[in-house]
Image (cartoon, rainbow, N blue to C red):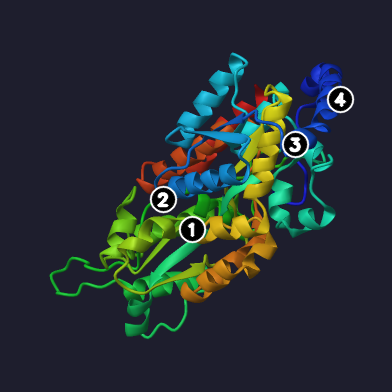
Amino acid sequence: MFKSQPWTVNRERLNRKRNKKDIRIKRWLCLLFLIPFILSCPSSKKVIEVTFWHAMGGPLGKTLEKMIADFEKEHPNIKIKSVGMGDYSALAQKLMGAIAVQSPPTIAQVYESWTTQFYQQGVLLPIDSLIQGPNGLSATDLADIFPIFVEDNTWDGKLLTFPFNKSVPVYFYNIKMFRDNGIKEFPKTWPEFKAVCKKLTKDTNGDGIKDIWGTGGGVNSWLFGCMLLQKGGDFFDEKTKRVLVNSPAGVSALEYLIDLIYKDSCQNFVLGYEPQNDFLSGKLAMIWGTSVSWAFMRDKMTFEVGLAPIPKWDKPAVLTYGTNIAIFRKAKPEAIGAAWQFIKWFTNTKNQARWASATFYCPIRKSSLNEPEMQSLMKEVKGLDETLTQLANAFFEPRGEEWFAGRRYLGEALESAMRLKQTPKQALDEMARRLEKEFKR
């Protein structure tokens, strides 16, 4: 599984650029030592611009913009040029195009599979070089960051990027429906979850059509991945590149998810944002989602909603999602220094509590949970504190560049099985063959 093992990349490709890269890094480090003095000089009237490409929109984007404005007030000599790309697909395309013409932004949100590609291309400035600098982070600061987020950003033993917007999977449930049906707590295991789903699925008017469903949605790769790990499975063997998604663990996980829809008839098959809409209108008793979904639903809630960790199979395991922040080495040294000032500010204890309480992303620092904002929120939202304990059993998806395509293959396999075009075994076997071809390229 992809935890507690720093990712390695193709060393042959890296060695071709290593000598030139080492010289550039030494030059950058010499200049970076001067940056704290430049930024703190009161007589300096020069405004340093940091271009930040991201995909934050809606209430998340509004919170980000407010925080950027506050940072600029505190740092009048730094301007964060915030450029929203709409969604992550557009962001990925824009970044790859900009790198191709050697014109990337100063910083950007990046997923791990993108990071691996950019690392191999030698276009990233390792965050570790700034952490170890005169304006860096202390050992206490680093120990305060949840370990899974440190591991997730570590390549070849060094922090290459820095955690930014991270989330965990959760279930939202209608507390009144649970209470009315004598259900005292959210199910802890998947067999219990199925039993509760069946109990909550009802034809209220006797017309033969279900009016309330236990849950809703399709089959998604995030929930499937969590189940795969819970059953002792894995995506693939990192050393041999043997794909393992189609193992008995993967097949049984997918069979369970599909049975909820067809065999057990307690999950309404609706896609997109319909599960959220149906939950808010009282047609679904529970829905799966990311913790961040609360930020989009809370203004529409007309009943008491609880949060709960996802159930488990053999052992607890969840996949964390979200992006990290990367700094591109093409930027001028003063822009890199200013970008690091922003990253440090955004990820300090107080601001992480502010970010998390407004967006429902996980704070990356453990100490943020003790801030008044988070303490108040955890008292207000039933189950929020328990969902955050999932970080103790968190993993991350594969980070190799092949997974950029592999994740799409997995999504297509799950949809094919969900629509009964293939059996779970057939769909996952085909996905495995497609991913193995990526490894051989």
Is tag 4's residue or tag 1's residue first in the polypeptide sequence? 4
Disc 2 element: helix
Residue at image mark 1: 358
Mark number displayed over residue 59? 2
The x and y percentages for residue 247 are 60, 48
Marks 2 and 1 in Cβ contact (< 8 Å): yes
Amino acid carrying label 2: it is Pro
Marks 4 and 1 in Cβ contact (< 8 Å): no
In what quadrant of the picture does the C terminus appear?
A: top right
The x and y percentages for residue 120 are 72, 25
Amino acid carrying label 1: it is Ala
Residue at image mark 3: 41
The residues tagged by marks 2 and 4 sit, at their Cα atoms, a distance apart of 41 Å
**Residue 257 visible in the current orientation:** yes
Marks 2 and 4 in Cβ contact (< 8 Å): no
The residues tagged by marks 1 and 3 sit, at their Cα atoms, a distance apart of 33 Å
The residues tagged by marks 3 and 2 sit, at their Cα atoms, a distance apart of 36 Å
- Please tell me which residue is depicted at 34% across the width and 68% down the height of the picture: 214
Residue at image mark 4: 26
